[in-house]
C-alpha cells in the first residue's frame, strides 16, 4: 500500500518562514513613517512623569506591555505592568494620581480594555493608547495616540498576533530608548546607572567601574624600572595574590612598562647567566596597553579580547599607575570575556 503524506516540501515551508519575516519587517518599515509629533509628545510625557509609567494590555498585547515596562524601568523610567483583567478586580489600586497609563490593544475595543479605560477616566489618570484602530474607544479616550496603522498579520489564517505585536514591541523600544537618550543628554542616566539596575547580569557586571575590580595597594605588583629583574621579582614573593605581571614605574609613579611571566620565560630560555641581574627596563614591554581608572570593566575586556593579554595596568589622567586588572579577577567576578 502506498502511503500518502500531507507534509509540504521543506522548501515551501522555508519560503513561508521567510515570508513571515518579510511581513513583520514590512510592518516595521511602515511604522517608521508614522513616527512624528505624537511620538515626541508621549516621550516627553513619560520623561517628565512624576509617578510611574504603567503599561497595560490583555493577551499577547499584554505580554508586550510587560516587556515595554521592563525596558522602561531598566533604562531609568519608573514603570510597572497592570494586567487589564486584574485591574478591575482591585489591582487599579496600584495606579496613583501622578502616573500615566500606556494601554496596548490593536483593536482598541477589547472588553477588559474598555472597562479599564472607563475606570481610569473616573480616576482622572491620563491614558496613552497604542492601537491600530484610531476610531476605537481606546483611541478616543486617550490623551495621546500612538497609531500603528493597518497591519496584516503574518499568520496564514490572519488571526494569531504576529506582525501587530512585533510593531508594538519595536515602538515600545523606540519610546523607551528615546527617553533614555533624553536622560543621558540631561545627565540623569549613565552607564553607571545601567550597572546599578543590572547587578545580576553579565552586561551590568561589565559596566562595573574599573576602580571596583582592580588590584591596588599591597595587592598591586609594582616596582621601579631601574631595579634589576632579581630585585623586582623579590618584592613579590610574599604577596598573597600572585599575578602574572609586574608593572614598572618611574620616580614620579608614571607607568613606563610591564614585565610578564612570558617575558621572564623567554629571557631564561635564552640561557644568559646574568639574566636576572639585568635592569628590568632593558627587557620590559614599553608603552603597554592600559585602561583609565574612570573606565569600566567592559573597557578592560575589550582590550583583553583584542590583544590577547591577561594583565592590564590602570592609570590616572596623569599616567600614574593606580592599579592592575588581572583576567582571573574578571572571571571570578562573573564577567564574560
Image (cartoon, helix red, strand yellow):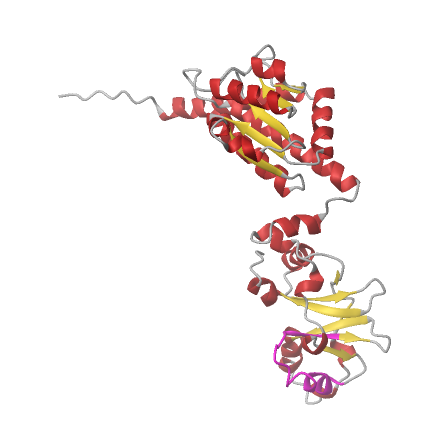
Depth check, front residue: 330 or 87:
87
Say which residue appears at 63% left-offset and 57% top-offset: 305
x then y, percent, for residue 302? 66, 55
x then y, percent, for residue 315? 78, 65
Say which residue appears at 63% left-offset and 74% top-offset: 244
Depth check, front residue: 258 or 295:
295
- The answer to whether residue 101 is above or below residue 198 is above
Say left or right for 274 vs 15: right
**The magenta stretch spans residue 290:** no
Say which residue appears at 64% left-offset and 57% top-offset: 301
Say left or right for 51 vs 280: left
Which region of the structure is painted magenta? 228-247
State the quadrant of the C terminus.
bottom right
The answer to whether any part of residue 148 appears in the image is: yes
The answer to whether any part of residue 26 appears in the image is: no
- The answer to whether residue 285 is above or below residue 200 is below
State the quadrant of the N terminus.
top left
Indicate the quadrant where residue 173 lies: top right
**The magenta stretch spans residue 240:** yes
Say which residue appears at 71% left-offset and 63% top-offset: 211
Amino acid at each position: 500500500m502506498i502511503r500518502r503524506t500531507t507534509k509540504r516540501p521543506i522548501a515551501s515551508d522555508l519560503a513561508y518562514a521567510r515570508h513571515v519575516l518579510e511581513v513583520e519587517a514590512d510592518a516595521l518599515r511602515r511604522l517608521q513613517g508614522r513616527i512624528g509629533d505624537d511620538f515626541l509628545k508621549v516621550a516627553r510625557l513619560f520623561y517628565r512623569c512624576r509617578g510611574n509609567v504603567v503599561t497595560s494590555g490583555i493577551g499577547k498585547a499584554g505580554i508586550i506591555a510587560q516587556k515595554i515596562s521592563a525596558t522602561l524601568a531598566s533604562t531609568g523610567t519608573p514603570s510597572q505592568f497592570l494586567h487589564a483583567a486584574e485591574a478591575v478586580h482591585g489591582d487599579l489600586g496600584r495606579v496613583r494620581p501622578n502616573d500615566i497609563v500606556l494601554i496596548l490593544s490593536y483593536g482598541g475595543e477589547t472588553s477588559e480594555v474598555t472597562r479599564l479605560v472607563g475606570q481610569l477616566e473616573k480616576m482622572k489618570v491620563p491614558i496613552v493608547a497604542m492601537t491600530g484602530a484610531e476610531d476605537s474607544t481606546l483611541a478616543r479616550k486617550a490623551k495621546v495616540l500612538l497609531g500603528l496603522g493597518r497591519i496584516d498579520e503574518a499568520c496564514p489564517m490572519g488571526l494569531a498576533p504576529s506582525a501587530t505585536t512585533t510593531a508594538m514591541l519595536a515602538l515600545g523600544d523606540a519610546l523607551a530608548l528615546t527617553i533614555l537618550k533624553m536622560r543621558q543628554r540631561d545627565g540623569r542616566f549613565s552607564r553607571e546607572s545601567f550597572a546599578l539596575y543590572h547587578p545580576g547580569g553579565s552586561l551590568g557586571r561589565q559596566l562595573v567601574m574599573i576602580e571596583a575590580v582592580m588590584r591596588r595597594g599591597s595587592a598591586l605588583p609594582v616596582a621601579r624600572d631601574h631595579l634589576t629583574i632579581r630585585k623586582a621579582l623579590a618584592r613579590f614573593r610574599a604577596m598573597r595574590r600572585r599575578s602574572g605581571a609586574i608593572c614598572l614605574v618611574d620616580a614620579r609613579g608614571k607607568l613606563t612598562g610591564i614585565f610578564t611571566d612570558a617575558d621572564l620565560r623567554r629571557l631564561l630560555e635564552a640561557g644568559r647567566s646574568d639574566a636576572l641581574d639585568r635592569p628590568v627596563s632593558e627587557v620590559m614591554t614599553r608603552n603597554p596597553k592600559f585602561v583609565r581608572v574612570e573606565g569600566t570593566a567592559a573597557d578592560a575586556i575589550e582590550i583583553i579580547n583584542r590583544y590577547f593579554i591577561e594583565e592590564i595596568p590602570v592609570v590616572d589622567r596623569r599616567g600614574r599607575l593606580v592599579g592592575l586588572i588581572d583576567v582571573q579577577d574578571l572571571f571570578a567576578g562573573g564577567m564574560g570575556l
